[in-house]
Each structure stands twice: as C-alpha cells, then as structure tokens.
Amino acid sequence: GAAPPPCPPCGPQPAAPPSSPPLSPPFSTPAPCPLPPPAQGVAVQMPRPSSAEYLNNQQSAFAWQYDQVLHNASQDQVYTQAVAPIVSEALRGVNGTVLVYGQTGAGKTYTAIGDMANFKYRGITPRAISDIFAFIDRSPELEVDVAISSLEIYNDTLTDLLAALPSSAGRSGDLQICEDGKTGEISVKGQRVVPVRAEEEALTLLFEGESNRAVAHHALNKNSTRGHSIFTVYTTVRSRVESSGRVLSSKLHLVDLAGSERLKKTGTSGERMAESMAINRSLSYLEQLVVALGSKGRSHLPYRQSKLTHLLKDAVGGNCKTLLIACIHGEAQHLEESVGTLQFAARAMKVTNAVSVNEAADPAMLLRRYEAEIRQLKQELAMHDSLAGRARVAYDPFGEHEQAELREVLQRFLDSQAPEPPLESLRMMRELLNQMKAIYQQLRHELNTRPTLHAPDGADTSAAGDGSAVGGLSATGEDAESVGDVDMARSQGIAVGQAPGGA
C-alpha cells in the first residue's frame, strides 16, 4: 500500500526500527522532529487498445511519489513504520486519524483489524490499543484515562456498534452529528463512549463492534464490509507528580473505509447493489472534499455532503495528524481501480492540517492548588499580624453572630448612642459597608410601605380667606395648626402652599 505522510507541523515521520525505545512520557521534553525519509514512487503503465479507426490519446502512463511504499509488508512492519508515530503523538495531546482506503477485496479490513483468530496477524487497531496500554504500564507517574467508541456509516446512516441491540436500534440511523459552534469540534449525539481500564476490555469492545458490522458476499470478497467503520480511542493524560493542573486530551480515529466497487465486477443486485451505490457515493464525496482542500482559493468546503465527510471534518483539513493507507490490487484485471486509488492518495497528500496540542487545565486540581495557596497566605498574614502586635485580626468571613453584633454597634452609632466603631481591618470595613447597606434598604422599605394621607370625600381643598383651616377641617379642630394643601392629584402626601391670613 502507499501511505501519504502525516500532516504538518512535524511533517512525515520516518520508519521506526523494530528495536526503537519506548514512547517517552508526554510531560517530558519531546525529541526534535526527524528529517523526512526519501520519497518512494509508484509507476503504472496502462495497456492501450490499438485501433485503425481512431487515434487513442488517452493517458496510459502514471507516476506518483509517496512517503512510503510497503510491498508485501507484514502487519508488524505496517504498524511500526506508518501508524506508531500517530499513536505516539496522540498520547502527547495531538489528535490522530488513520484512514484505510482502497478497492473492495484489496485488504483494507485485514490491515485495520487483521486476523482475529491469529495473534501474529492482528491489524493496526489492536496493535494501537496494545501500544497505548503498554505506555500506561511504563508511566506510573501519569494518570491516563481511556475510553472507546465504535460507529458504522451504513447507507449514509450512523450506527452505534456498541449499542445493546445494534440489529434493531442501531440500524435506525437516529444518531446525529453535532458541531460545536465555538470550537468546531465534531461529536455524535447519543453514541456510547465506554471507559476502559485494561487492554482486554478495549479488545473486547473492538471485537464486539466488528461482530456487529454489516457484512455480505460478492464476487470479489466473500466477507465484504458494507459500511465505513470508525473506531475511536479517547485519551486524557495528567501528571500525578506535577501540580500545574495540565491535562492533555486527544482522539485517535482508526477508520476502515468500505471499498469502492464496480457493479459489473462484483455482480451484485438488489440490496447489495443499493449498498454499493451508497458506498461509492460517500467515497466520491470524500474525494471531492479532498480535491477542494488541495485547491487554492476555494471558499466553500463540502463537509456536509455526507455523514462520512462531516464526521471526518477534524481529520481532513482540521486539527489532526492524518495518515492514509492506500491498499491496491496487484493483478492486471484490477489495474484501473488501482490507478484510481493511487490518484486519490496523491491528492490527499496535498491537504494540510492545522495541528495543535489539546491542552487544558484540570478544574479539580486547580481548586486544590488554590485552596492550598489560600491556607498558606492566611498563615503568613497571621504571622505578620502577630509580629506587629495585631493578634485580634482575623481573615475568615464574618459569621451570623458576628454580623448581628456589628450591626447593633453600627445602629447605636447612627442613633448617636455610641462612638464610631473601631476599624481593625479591611475585612471589618467591608462588613460595615454591607451592614450599612442593609440598614439603608430596611429604612427605604419602611418608608415605601407607610400609608399615604388622602383628603376626605367632599372636602373643600381650596384656600379660604376667612381663616378656616386646610384640608376641610374647621379652625377649631385638632389639626387647626396644620399648614398646606392636600395634593389630590398625586395622593402621595401634603404639598406645601401659602398659609391663609390670620394663621
């Protein structure tokens, strides 16, 4: 197969020797990026039919350059030279994707999964799982959380391969792709993400998902998978010895794409033909997206044409290191399909991803660190106050009993019954302001709830020149000494007016 290189910024990774040292912990200083290996090429000469009736100018010679060409390579060699660097970067907080692409029957599922009955011939997915848990065993200073999900795109509908009843509920296609409006991160609503703590648990989920995939028989493959499989490993790495609160997270997508098919070669009909058409259509949309990403000046990128392109938005042109493994047939009868596969791989090499480390802060660890800092600062303040002779100064918030006492002292001060309260600290000044605000709000509430004065019905409120009192009361009444007129318009009190003569 021909493998295009991983995406920048690190560039293509060289083939790691089998005796390479273990992966270094992600919190250590990373090694410098190695130089890319020399490119390897593939040349194809297509037979050109000769005819005396017309001139055939169709292109028959092709040549491409790739990062690596693995001819008759073992499963271990494919993983070590192509996939291991992607897994290593995923444990350092960089998203990774491995796409296995090619014609039906070319060995894609064998490359991705391998022979489940023979440990020696296991594929890149179980080897990646083993590598991740071997890294965890070698790094006791790190806390690594691992979770697994497995999806299948069958007839352009999303199926959860880890669902309880995939044959009924999973085929309904109820799963929807969601995209974060702020970060652009892609997720699937309703999918099952299972935490795992051991390699055996992860392999069990892998084999469970594979057993739930849609498989059928046709002329080129007796066990042809009828949908695209996306097996995802979620990792979260944090240090047990550092107190920085740094958390590295990543997603590793291992994608087994369904093979492109020619109906005249597979001989399918009915339901199998509908599946073939859905597979070819989704792969065509994927190629259109790759061509658009590799072209300059394209304003529109067709990510939403299919579930496959939308789900792989991060992997193709996003924040991810992506590797494409192109599997081809060596027989002359499949030469035309092999040329199409190699052409797609060459176009995929032109896609550039913007890769960054997914680093965040652990809220629980930050909270513990801040609490420790606060305790230390309080101890330093207590020591400083003790040396300055201010042993009574406290820095904890006021309790209910202390607030009541301080409010009583402040109330006596406002009533001119006590001197001003002592200001021992900024803490007391803030509490005094809070209590002053509470007293003000209470007085304001009492003023607003007092009853208003209204004039009696039928009373004459006009000013009298004969010395009569105001508000309809006689001059001999109890309120004869009152001055002013009742504000009948507002009915909110007594308005100030001119006193009548003789008042």
Image (spheres, rainbow, N blue to C red):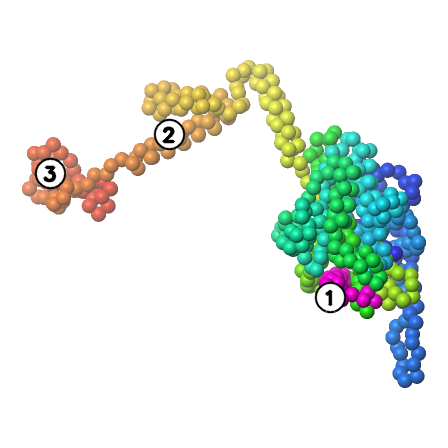
Q: Residue 348 at x, y = what percent?
A: 80, 59
On the rendered structure, is 498 left or right of 354?
A: left
Q: Is mark 3 on a helix, strand or loop?
A: loop
- Name the kind of residue labelled 1 in the image: Gly
Residue at 85% over, 48% down? 115
**The magenta stretch spans residue 335:** no
Ranked by sequence position, the earlier of labels 3 and 1 is 1
Judge depth for marks 3 and 1 and give the one in front: 1
* Dominant secondary-structure state across the stretch colored magenta: helix
Q: Residue 340 at x, y = what percent?
A: 83, 65
Residue 473 circle label: 3
Marks 2 and 3 sit apart, C-alpha to C-alpha, by 38 Å
> As rendered, which of 367 and 402 lies closer to the eye?
367
Marks 3 and 1 sit apart, C-alpha to C-alpha, by 104 Å
Structural crowding at the residue carrying mark 2, measured as other residues with C-alpha within 10 Å and reported as few (<14), some (14–19) or many (≥20): some
Q: Give the range drawn in magenta.
A: 265-291
Q: Which residue carries the number 2 mark? A: 439
Q: Is residue 157 visible?
A: yes
